[in-house]
Image (cartoon, rainbow, N blue to C red):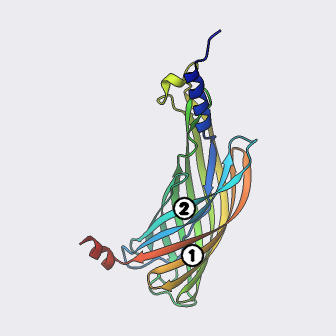
Amino acid sequence: MKKTTPLALITTLLLSACSTPPAVHSHLARFDAPEVADTPLVINYKLGTNKTNVIPKDTSAPIHDEEDLYLGADISLSHGFEFNFEVSPQAPTLGYGLKYQLSGDSRENARPGNVSHAITVAYHASANGEGNDGRGNQYAQSLALYDIAWISGYRLTPQWLVYGSLFYQHGNLDISYNPEHHHSRCQPTCLTGTLYEQTSSNYGLSLSTEYQPFQYVFVTLEGTYLHADWYNRDKSELALNAALTVQFTPEEVLRGIF
């Protein structure tokens, strides 16, 4: 009978304790207004909350919510185009996309009664869910999510904008063993290859109100509904998020650089 040394037992316990079961973190924050600045290189820095819907692969584990930060930046390009970048550090999730304003006045020229429409195409990547199977075999989870949305807005006052969106998401999920880490801890041999993969389609809508209390400062309150289906477990979720946006014009950016 093979004896288990105290060191090996402690190592096994630590690996099990540090293991993170596979789970998909579906972020619900969007903060995408339909009005785009006509002036190129106007930058909007965003700091907000991002409620996350967590769907574990283990069906005995409950679907639950987590709170994360939302860090984002929008950069106006020209002719109604805007580049978006966002990150949520806890998962972590990284995203970027392109917005195009189809109709309505630009943000600088918008007056009360302005109706605006825009479309966005975005890509989100997440690498959460790294862990081990209790036998020293390391696995890593990766998620690629493609997002397309239609956004419509109505300006009530010079400082107050309300808008909503309909969005559709198509995602690819992959969990694979990674034998390059902790070779000596695999018992009896290191496993390789794909552990699990899935393609999923999600959809939802959002409703937001944006208020400008000061010049270059915006406050947004947003409600989002998302229906997600991962690991063959579907879940509908409603979230409330808020964000603070600070805007920088090209003159201020150049002044800060030079």
Q: Quadrant of the N terminus?
A: top right
Residue 136 visible, this orientation: no
Kindly state the secondary structure of the residue where label 1 is placed. Answer: strand
> Which amino acid type is shown beneath numbered disc 1?
Thr
Kindly state the secondary structure of the residue where label 2 is placed. Answer: strand
Percent position (x, y) of residue 190? 54, 23
Q: Quadrant of residue 146?
A: bottom right
> Which amino acid type is shown beneath numbered disc 2?
Leu
| For discs 1 and 2, the disc positioned in front in the rendered view | 2
Name the residue at the top extreme.
1
**Lower position in the chain sequence, tag 1 or tag 2:** 2
Residue 216 visible, this orientation: yes
Percent position (x, y) of residue 36? 47, 76
Distance from disc 1 to disc 2, alpha carbons, whole Å, reads 15 Å
Report the side of 235 relative to 207 (left or right): right
Residue at 76 percent of width and 41 percent of height: 60
The residue where tag 1 is placed is: 220
Name the residue at the right extreme.
60
Against 82, residue 168 (above or below) is above
Against 108, residue 129 (above or below) is above
Residue at 74 percent of width and 42 percent of height: 59
Q: Residues within 10 Å of mark 2 (few under 14, many from 20)?
A: some
The residue where tag 2 is placed is: 69
Against 123, residue 164 (above or below) is below
Count all numbered tags in the image, as a single digit.
Answer: 2
Which one is nearer the viewer's eye here, 224 or 65?
A: 65
